[in-house]
Image (cartoon, grey):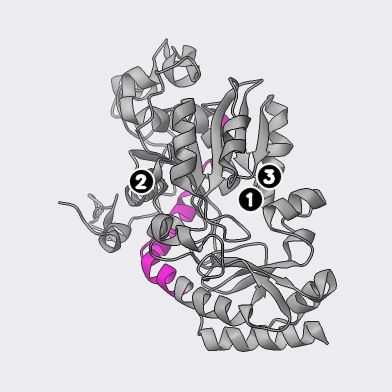
Amino acid sequence: MAYGFNTLQIHAGAAPDPTTGARNTPIYQTTAYVFRDADHAAALFNLQEVGYIYSRLTNPTVAVLAERIATLEGGQGAVCCSSGHAAQLMALFPLMSPGKNVVASTRLYGGTITQFSQTIKRFGWSATFVDFDDLDAVKAAINDDTRAVFCESIANPGGYITDLDAISAISDAAGIPLIVDNTSATPYLCNPIEHGATLVVHSTTKYLTGNGTVTGGCVVDSGKFDWSASDKFPSLSQPEPAYHGLKFHETFGALAYTFHGIAIGLRDLGMTMNPQAAHYTLMGIETLSLRMERHVQNAEEIAGWLEGHDAVDYVTYAGLKSSPYNGRVERICPKGAGGLFTIALKGGYDACIKFVDNLEIFSHVANLGDTRSLVIHSASTTHRQLSPEQQEAAGAGPNVVRISIGIEDAADLIADLDQALKAASS
């Protein structure tokens, strides 16, 4: 039977605890698991049997979360890890090798741009940044050494919506996977796999958890990519020495990428999600659809009000009729354009600082996707390490403030924004 989203966000991956009957998924706070006997242990270590060995690899609480997110995204499997940044490295790890590159959108979270432009160089990888609205430029950036295309469904900070259908057509033609960061949209608003994504990554810290309590990340595999169609992905198609020549794609089929993420990725990189974090995120996901509906409702009302304010130069919310991305909402994010956008203030950098400092309900934090409304000046914080050109390309110029709309009463949020804008203009 095919269940609806609201049912799956509560039940997918979970069942009453077989020992105690506990209805909520327990926090399995353990590092290791007792083997039935020596043969059982050997089978687990040989990947001949699925089970629990050590919590760096797998944990029952984390496993429920992975299955729930995979189900909501329409994927074959998922691997949870310690943060969204960890998820990005986990996603690239089976695909890349020294000398290979990823083609990435210029409209990404500042930390992702830094990770891709600086940190991954230490692995011998590189990234080429392209405006993903320029499809010819995306095609031209892909070469024989490209191993992935990377973008965000709803880009942080501006709330820009990527044309995933067009980008996936390009990646498919090149025979390489498309990785989509679906953090800002969540599977409730956008399903990247339906639009051709091979892999979906999340910072579960944000909307999926929704309460600002724990960090986490997840990589979801669509199970649709043929890793053996070329010699570009030897980690998945060729013999793995650590497992006596086992070929992941040949052995595990549609779950090859997921098994590799656990058996190699978590084993060697060790970016493990702890079971308590998984527990908090599972509780958050149970109300995901309800929260996202309110985030969108509030964002539409508040963005419309901000667009008419004398102190505001422009608002980037894709849900506005004036947005150049509004036409993509119905096709890519049919339930709404999310709760994240930026505003540019006519007073520039100084006005932005005064505006942020005078807000009362909005919390000034380096986070988004919380039930609380949040604000940050990206150019001086999350995008500070970028050049001015990179900041502008990412939609995080010095006159821009990022706003993450929460689920409070919209009238109260508007009143708070109004008084802070007046203070910033004085």
Residue 280's mark?
none
**Closer-to-camera residue (124/259):** 124
Q: Position of residue 223 (x, y in %)?
A: 35, 34
Q: At x 28% / y 29%, what residue is drawn?
A: 36
Q: At x 67% / y 71%, what residue is drawn?
A: 314
Query: Can residue 92 be spotted in the picture?
Result: yes
Q: Position of residue 362 (x, y in %)?
A: 64, 77
The disc, 3 or 2, on the residue closer to the chain's N-terminal end is 3
**Closer-to-camera residue (97/9):** 97
Mark 3 and mark 2: Cα distance apart in space: 26 Å
Describe residue 19's horizontal placement relative to residue 220 as left or right.
left
Q: Which residue is mark 2?
A: 194
Image-quadrant location for residue 54: top left
Q: At x 49% / y 41%, what residue is drawn?
A: 167
Three-letter amino acid code at the position of disc 2? Glu
The crowd level at tag 1 (other Cα within 10 Å; few <14, some 14-19, many 20+) is many
| Image position of 343 with respect to 70: above or below | below
Describe residue 109's horizontal placement relative to residue 214 as left or right.
right
Magenta span includes 194: no
Secondary element at image label 1: loop
Characterize the magenta stretch by its predominant secondary structure: helix
Secondary element at image label 3: helix
Residue 113's mark?
3
Mark 1 and mark 2: Cα distance apart in space: 22 Å
Query: Can residue 83 be spotted in the picture?
Result: no
Question: Could you tell me which quadrant the C terminus lies in?
Answer: bottom right
Describe residue 128's horizontal placement relative to residue 225 as left or right.
right
What segment is highlighted magenta in the picture?
268-294
Secondary element at image label 2: helix
Three-letter amino acid code at the position of disc 3? Ile
Residue 107's mark?
1
Mark 1 and mark 3: Cα distance apart in space: 9 Å
